[in-house]
Amino acid sequence: MSNNSKSGGNSKLPRPKFSIYWIYAIIALAFVGLNLFYSGGGPIETNFQKVKIQMLAKGDVEKMVIVSNQRRVDVYLKKDRIANYKKDFESTNSYKSPSKAGPQFYFSIGSPDEFQKSLDEYQKTLPADKQVTITFDNSKNWTGDVISILLYVGLIVLVWIFLFRRMSKGAGGGGGNIFSVGKSRAQLFDKENHVRVNFNDVAGLDEAKVEIMEIVDFLKNPQKYTELGGKIPKGALLVGPPGTGKTLLAKAVAGEANVPFFSLSGSDFVEMFVGVGASRVRDLFKQAKEKAPCIVFIDEIDAIGRARGKNANFSGNDERENTLNQLLTEMDGFGTNVGVIILAATNRADILDRALLRAGRFDRQIYVELPDLNGREEIFKVHLRPLKLDAKLDTSFLAKQTPGFSGADIANVCNEAALIAARKNKAQVDKQDFLDAVDRIIGGLEKKNKIISQDEKKTIAYHEAGHATVSWLLEYANPLLKVTIVPRGRALGAAWYLPEERQITTTEQIMDELSATLGGRASEEIVFGKISTGALNDLERVTKQAYAMVTYYGMNKELGNISFYDSSGQNEYALAKPYSEKTAELIDSEAKHIIEVAYVKAKEVLEQNREGLNKLAELLLEKEVIFSEDLENIFGKRKGAKEILSVKPAEESKPAELAEGTSSVEESKEE
Ligand code: ADP
């Protein structure tokens, strides 16, 4: 800490910290040093002939040393003669200069004895003052060996570190330090880094809130529960589809309880290295215990909590299982009164390991479902708060327009609506902007420049008119909201329904919906006598639905009340089907039969209402977008229709603008 602080205004002196660059620097230095060591004044190679003629004959040689185990002879020149040989050194191009101490030259020999014999003979021809002494050096040259070994080791270490860093970075970043791979990656929100979300920001989810509010109370007044002998739960599992506010709820708990909050995702435990996941779990719990009382939130826990395989050789997921085992152990390991509560979220509770769900671990499961009408209205209210709204905007209308939307979708609609209004330079966001935003979110971007020929356009118009007609005339099909032939996203045209919010669906409802979905293809067949690829999406949905009726819902007489649905997710990877070949054949033929019946019905409806179908298609070709009002004008009021919401823009807007602004959706979002 003796350094003066550097410019830059950082008041804290940087602590000397181990960093990877130190290793790089050391290795680089070693290379430079070695290079110098070898280059500075080492001997250069020559041969015996040259030594005899140029050096010995002139009497320049002081002594010669036979390094016998390397079959080499070192030549030491007389001090005053060295300068004469400078030229030899320059011509070698090796930047070496002759060393004073010697040896200056060396040459290789076959066998030391032979060499000595021939040298002795030669020396005999020389005058006494030119003769040199010959010594033997039998020692081994260790330094060279040691240095080259070190060099190799250094190189391997360097490569290893480099790879290690690359891998840990690729897997989410190890903080740039190889020693922190096993550290938990949890993000900590505490006093400095406060969570500003509270229960007011979470709309709807009333039951979930009550359950989770209790957890806040545990953390605030643990005595109240422990005095009575109760145990504070260790964890709660939030289960529900994506975007329904699970993370938000966990954050709100932390914000309300005013305790530190560790947030991480299940995939943060996963790394390429064996044992890292388990080590991260340990580290997470260690940190959490230090900060207790606190909340640990693990999002997407299914990344590690998936049921462990029965066949260890087959699963190949040892690392994930180790991580899960560690998590189970840690959750058992801490006492109930430590004040650490684990919240976890998943949208696949069915595939979680049963050990994770047993009492004493995630004691409570809190279901967070897609919001219903009231829930959506409340969520809209939360997200409309920051927007400048048209005074006439009705939130209940918006909620009705967005069946099947999650909280995240609604947040997205609000934001998108504001952006659309801004693009149109409006001072306030109005109803039309919201409708456009909803269209945009379900249907994707409008593609006005898609090249569509007149014939194709006609086919699309009749296809969509087919959907519209069948769904309008069949009692149990979903009520239609609007139809468009403006291409959007990947769809060339779309019919947008407003599904009823119901919890159970009857066979009649499914059958009518199948007919409506097949209405497009039926219309093409009736009108043009040929079919097209445009019905791909319809057929896919119909097929899935028909198979679900037979294999899951037991809605088929031939098969009876049988369901092969697997809510535990255990058989997801099973190789064998849970039924016989014969049943498989029956399933196929029954699904085909269901689709056939629905198709025949669709054709029947269209043939009986051919005139209306034509009118509708012509209207579509003319206006590109039509609404439920237009259908009512053609076919009359719908059977069993309840309330039809008008999404038709106000009269003053021109039809051309209309077509641009309001397109609709291929399918309802309801599953
Ligand atoms: P997940 O269930 O996938 O964890 P999130 O909690 O991350 O979903 O929700 C994503 C976003 O959706 C939130 O940041 C919030 O803006 C919005 N959101 C979801 N549910 C609600 C809700 N009930 N009330 C208010 N906003 C919500």
Image: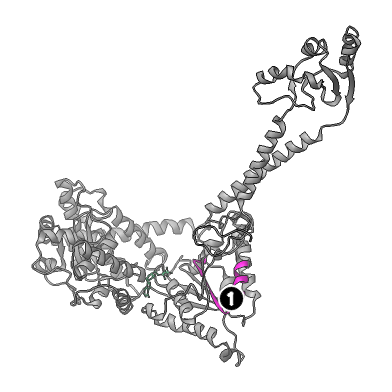
**Image coordinates for residue 617, horizontal then vertical, percent:** 13, 57
The picture quadrant for ligand 1 comes to bottom left
Q: How many marks?
A: 1
Left or right of 571, for residue 106: right
Residue 374 found in image quarter? bottom left
Decide whether residue 293 is among the magenta residues.
yes
Residue 396 visible to the viewer:
yes
- Residue closest to the eye, 291 or 469: 291
Expressed as whole percent of the image width and height from the top left, the position of residue 26 reads 66, 45
Seen from the viewer's position, the closer of residues 158 and 24 is 24
On the image, numbered disc 1 is attached to which residue? 291
Range shown magenta:
283-301
Q: Position of residue 634 (x, y in %)?
A: 10, 65
Instruction: Give the residue at x 28% y 53%.
Output: 490
At 62% from the left and 67% from the top, the residue drawn is 283
Residue 250 part of the magenta segment? no
Could you say which quadrant of the image residue 484 lies in? bottom left
Q: Residue at x 89, y 11 (%)?
A: 123
Please tell me which residue lies in front, 109 or 631: 109
Answer above or below: position of 433 versus 225: above
Residue 602: where, in percent of width, then height? 22, 61
Q: Tell me the amino acid under the disc marked 1.
A: Lys
